[in-house]
Image (cartoon, helix red, strand yellow):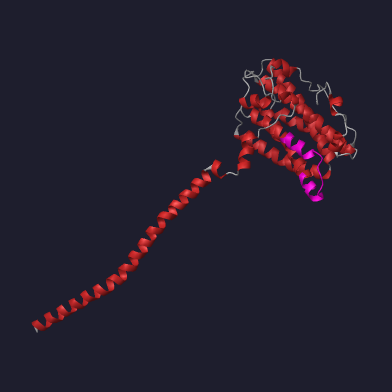
Amino acid sequence: MIRTSAFINIRQALKSSLASQTLLPRIMLPAATLISRRTINTVPKNQHQETSYKKMTDVVGTMPRDVLREMLESRPIPMREEFMDGQKLTTSVLEQIDFGKGKHVQPRSFGDRAAYYTVKFLRTLPDTYFGRNHYMRAVMLETVAAVPGMVGAMWRHMRSLRTMSEDSGWIAHLLHEAENERMHLMTWMKCLKPSLGDRLLVLGAQGVFFNAYFLLYIFSPKTAHRFCGYLEEEAVISYTHFLNDIDAGIIKNAPAPKVAIDYYNLHPSASVRDVVLAVRADEAVHRDANHFLSDRISINQEDILSEVKHADVNSVHQGSSFA
């Protein structure tokens, strides 16, 4: 019995050994193959992802050549001819710019009167809230003043697409106006840090004003431009008050931000007072331009470029500024 039991145990051991020799390779080989495949595939995949990420982060290498050239060469262009490249502007030159002191367009229609009195009412809000905090007042003003140009350009762009007709120069000017106002904002943001409350106030005011002005432009572009003209009249007044408080010593005449020096071609030693003079001159251009555009709409003569091409522009504006 002992020999028989031993023989059975040996036989079972041999069977288990043969089974292991037969089954183990069948089990281990696919697993090893799978692991090896994963190892082989993982390395190129990681390398491919890394290469793709490097390509996406390589701005110069992946950006279309014409887009790269445009971004490198483009720069904000001032509104007025006096600020174009040339001799650096000093305080005495800035003070000689004619900004049309006290210039005002009398309301002639119901829409004009509505626009005028609405602007007068809206002015009481920053007068009450900001007082003589001219920096924050300027920030609030520019976040609102940069809206009309963009809204008008957008509306006229869409109309040009719908009617498949030329625009006659309106879009380019209105976009330039919006950019100019945005550069004012970028300048004043270098001079202060608005609180969270002020930022929320700006956000709410811009949201309400954008939608209201957009609706106004849809129903009455003439009134919209008249409204903007009166808004810029108040901007000229506000910057004049800003200037007076600097001269009175109420506000420190600090060095001008570099963004303003570069944009307005100012002297390297320019001050905030010089920037206020330059910005006020810009606002005078916007004032006159929007009143002019409103008048053109009222007489139904919006094809301005065709008339300009047949006019002697130099003789008309010789010796006078646009403002």
Q: Position of residue 27 (x, y in %)?
A: 31, 70
Q: Picture quarter containing residue 227? A: top right
Q: Position of residue 172 (x, y in %)?
A: 76, 38
Q: Position of residue 119 (x, y in %)?
A: 79, 33
Quadrant that contains the N terminus: bottom left
Residue drawn at 73 percent across, 39 percent down: 150
Quadrant that contains the C terminus: top right
Residue drawn at 74 percent across, 21 percent down: 240
| Front residue of 141 and 174 | 174
Residue drawn at 61 percent across, 25 percent down: 258
Q: Picture quarter containing residue 80? A: top right
Looking at the picture, does residue 95 appear above or below residue 121?
above
- Give left or right: position of 225 versus 133: right
Looking at the picture, does residue 313 appear above or below residue 174?
above
Q: Position of residue 95 (x, y in %)?
A: 74, 17
Looking at the picture, does residue 160 appear above or below residue 130?
below
Q: Which residues are magenta?
A: 157-178
Residue with the most extreme front position: 65
State whether the magenta stretch is mostly helix, strand or loop: helix
Q: Does the image show residue 288?
A: yes
